[in-house]
Image (cartoon, helix red, strand yellow):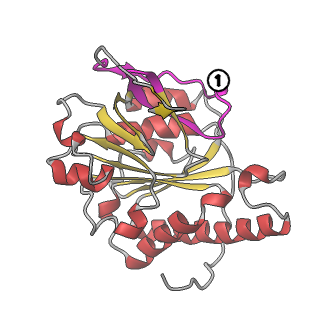
Amino acid sequence: MSWNGALQMDIQVGTLPTSVDFDWDHTQYKEALPIPIGVSQRGTEVFDLAESPHLLIAGVPGFGKSNFLHVLIHALMPRAFICVIDLKRLEFAYLKKHAAVVRDEGEALSLMRMLNDEMEHRIDTLEQADVVKIQQYRGNMPYIVLVIDELAEIKDETLLMLIDRIVRLARAVGISVVASTQRPSTKVVSGDTRAMFAARLCFQVADELNSRMILGETCPLAAYLPGIKGRAIWRFGMVEREVQAMYLPIDRAKKRLSQTKGVRYELPKCQAKRLPPR
């Protein structure tokens, strides 16, 4: 990196651990929505979802996508209201008393209509308060994080439109989207929508093409990751690092719920407003 005419070189040595237990205390961080991406050669990589609110995750089955979503949810739960679209129906069922968990497209459609209504209400509220983002608002407006496990399973066009609208418009009002998929094709995530996900985490994929679809045209690295569960490439801005994600099995995740006080929040149960075309 060049700085005032000097060249700074960051040389890293050593190997990453093959397993990292979930160990997280959100009170140690000043960020609004800190999450542990994983351990790199620089230490624990921490990302503030409030500052760049959308995260795209990809990788073949069995190498860490769903586990990372458990890590993310439990890291965020003390500071955000969590919504989960779980069309596979089993992975996040244990959270149903602690988060808004939906398990079919009908329920997901109702949830997304509520989130869009909530977004419109928040935009109106911030406008009346003469502020431009949630961080400047002094009233009660908790962060909301929508987690989608396997985006490719969603077929309903209206549902996809409502998700896309949140991705495009909800940054300032504190609503984030974390979406995971096995198949990172343009049929699953359109080019325009993909561009809104500035943060990307890619576990092992089948080939360079799939790596580039998620991480960008210049990054084939996820195709060459070692066959280690939880190993991924993290990319955000100029950062591009290999990481080992933390491991949180479901039995331990269930035990943590009794120790965690999540954010309680009621979404408006009203009919969605007529939405403009995409």
Camera-nearest residue between 192 and 157: 192
Residue drawn at x 43%, y 38% is: 70
Q: Secondary structure at mark 1?
A: helix
Residue found farthest to the front: 5
Residue drawn at x 61%, y 40% is: 33
Q: How many marks?
A: 1
| Position of 124 relative to 227 (above/below) | below
Q: Is residue 228 magenta?
A: no
| Position of 116 relative to 233 (above/below) | below
| Mark 1: amino acid | Gln
Q: Residues within 10 Å of mark 1 (few under 14, many from 20)?
A: few
Residue drawn at x 61%, y 31% is: 260
Residue drawn at x 17%, y 30% is: 227
Whole-percent x and y of residue 266?
Answer: 69, 58
**Res 181 → quadrant:** bottom left
Camera-nearest residue between 2 and 175: 2
| Image position of 83 (left or right of 150) | right
Give the magenta range. Answer: 16-44
Whole-percent x and y of residue 173?
Answer: 67, 59
Whole-percent x and y of residue 80?
Answer: 63, 45
Whole-percent x and y of residue 218?
Answer: 27, 49
Instruction: Tell me the quadrant of the picture where the N terminus can be found.
Output: top left
Which residue corresponds to mark 1?
28
Camera-nearest residue between 199 and 247: 199
Q: Is residue 29 magenta?
A: yes
**Res 125 → quadrant:** bottom right
| Position of 213 relative to 114 (above/below) | above
| Image position of 27 (left or right of 113) | right
Residue found farthest to the left: 207
